[in-house]
Image (spheres, rainbow, N blue to C red):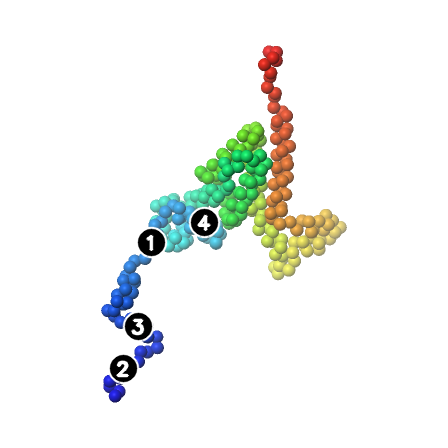
Amino acid sequence: MSGTRTQEPADGEQDHVAPGSPAWWAARQERARPARRVPVTLERIVAGALELVDRDGLGALSMRNLAAELETGTTSLYRHVSGKDEVLVLVADSVLGGTVPLRAMPDLGWREVLEALARSMRATLGAHPNLAPLFATAVPVGPNSLRGRELTLHALRERGFDAALAADVHTALAHQVLASVLQEPMNDFRAGGLGPAEGMTLREFYHSLPAGTYPHLVELADELTSRTADEEFEFGLACLLDGVELRLQKSRTRRPRARSAKSPG
């Protein structure tokens, strides 16, 4: 009879859990249980800021955006840092901590040490290209930066560099690495094309120039635009170290020889 028929569940209600059942109580407890908050620490702030900058660029970093990234409020951030500028300083120093330690290379000559250091620095900074402008506007002096600088200078002095040459070589090497990282996007520009429609590559543009006005640009168009970023860096590094070798030889020949015990006076 119609009065005694069991009502069929409506579509979408087959999985309905009866109130008071064990499954209902378990689900209710899960809903009532507050989500566990991950504590905000200085390490999390630095890591979150680096992830934000890597993904969205330096311009995206603000205390508000960083708080959203960490799913917290800005008040929690200000318990650890004074503001965005301090966060950037800490992020930059954190990145520099990824450079290869020189203590692991005691048996290498000065050239091998500098090659390893330069390649490691470039790989470290190249992994975070959005941060590169920070290193172009101020000399980093955080713990990781100072440690790396001290180890580099120690390695050079230990291998016969005088004080002036050790300092100059360290600075020149750092500049070489930073310039390479800052110019890396140029390779994409050269390959991607010029103009609003990006219909012409830089190589094609050089070839299209009037040869009478720009004979060498036209002649060397292929050579100027065929090198990879790695090839350009290695060439510049080799030129720099070749020059360092000449200066090292000159500095050694200028050193006064120690007097022998039988020398007069």
Residue sitting farthest toward the front: 107
Secondary structure state at the residue bearing disc 2? loop
Q: Amino acid at mark 4?
A: Leu
Residue 16 disc label: 3
Q: Residue at x 32, y 57 (%)?
A: 35
Residue 102: image location, x then y, percent: 51, 37
State left or right for residue 85 relative to residue 237.
Answer: left
| Residue annotated with mark 1 | 37
Is residue 164 shown above or below 66?
A: above
Q: Nearer the viewer, mark 1 or mark 3?
A: 3
Towards the viewer: 150 or 182: 150
Q: Nearer the viewer, mark 2 or mark 4?
A: 2
Distance from Cα at disc 1 to Cα at disc 4: 21 Å
Q: Residue at x 67, y 49 (%)?
A: 224
Secondary structure state at the residue bearing disc 4? helix
Distance from Cα at disc 1 to Cα at disc 3: 31 Å
Q: Would residue 116 be visible to someone looking at this image?
A: yes
Residue 252: image location, x then y, percent: 61, 27
Distance from Cα at disc 2 to Cα at disc 1: 47 Å
| Residue annotated with mark 4 | 50
